[in-house]
Image (cartoon, rainbow, N blue to C red):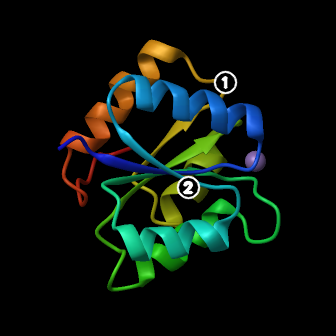
Amino acid sequence: MMAQILVVEDTPVNMKLVSMLLVKAGYRVLQADNAKDGIALAQRHQPDLILMDIQLPGMDGLAAARLLKAAQSTRHIRIVALTAFAMKGDEEKVREAGCDGYIAKPIEYKKFLVDVKQYLDRGANSQDAM
Ligand code: MN
């Protein structure tokens, strides 16, 4: 069975694009437009990967990643941050929050799917995941 991927993203056009690319590639997709719903879906469905937008209304993606990585039931799930910025300090913040990596927006279609597959194939605790 193809991997299940949870997308947490509040911007509808981004959600639509990311989901379309993933579904087209054969993945099963779960969607949440806020961190709270995303965490609940992660606990319930145990997805293989979470694509986590950083800037979300209310709880942001880094806080959500911290909670997911602190919880026994979800800490094993790989989290890749979707970030509009990719400066050095931000990369550190993403790593400190427990994310396994990040994908910079705007998304490049082909590279996006290659990156997603690599994160799925890679072990959750890989040291050089960034
Ligand atoms: Mn956002």
**Residue 33's spot in the image, x, y percent?**
70, 56
Q: Residues within 10 Å of mark 1 (few under 14, many from 20)?
A: few
The answer to whether residue 31 of the structure is visible from this angle is: yes
Q: Which of the two residues, 89 or 79, is positioned nearer the viewer here?
A: 79
| Left or right for 114, reference 82 | left
In what quadrant of the picture does the C terminus appear?
Answer: top left
**Residue 99's spot in the image, x, y percent?**
46, 58
> What's the residue at 53%, 79% (across, down)?
67
> What's the residue at 53%, 67% (across, down)?
65
Q: Of all residues shown, which one is farthest toward the bottom?
A: 72
Q: Which residue is mark 1?
A: 106
- In which quadrant of the rendered view does residue 25 lie? top left
Helix or strand or loop: what does disc 1 sit on?
loop
Q: Is residue 20 above or below residue 54?
A: above
**Residue 20's spot in the image, x, y percent?**
53, 27
**Amino acid carrying mark 1 in the image:** Pro
| Left or right for 53, reference 59 | left
Q: Which residue is mark 2?
A: 94
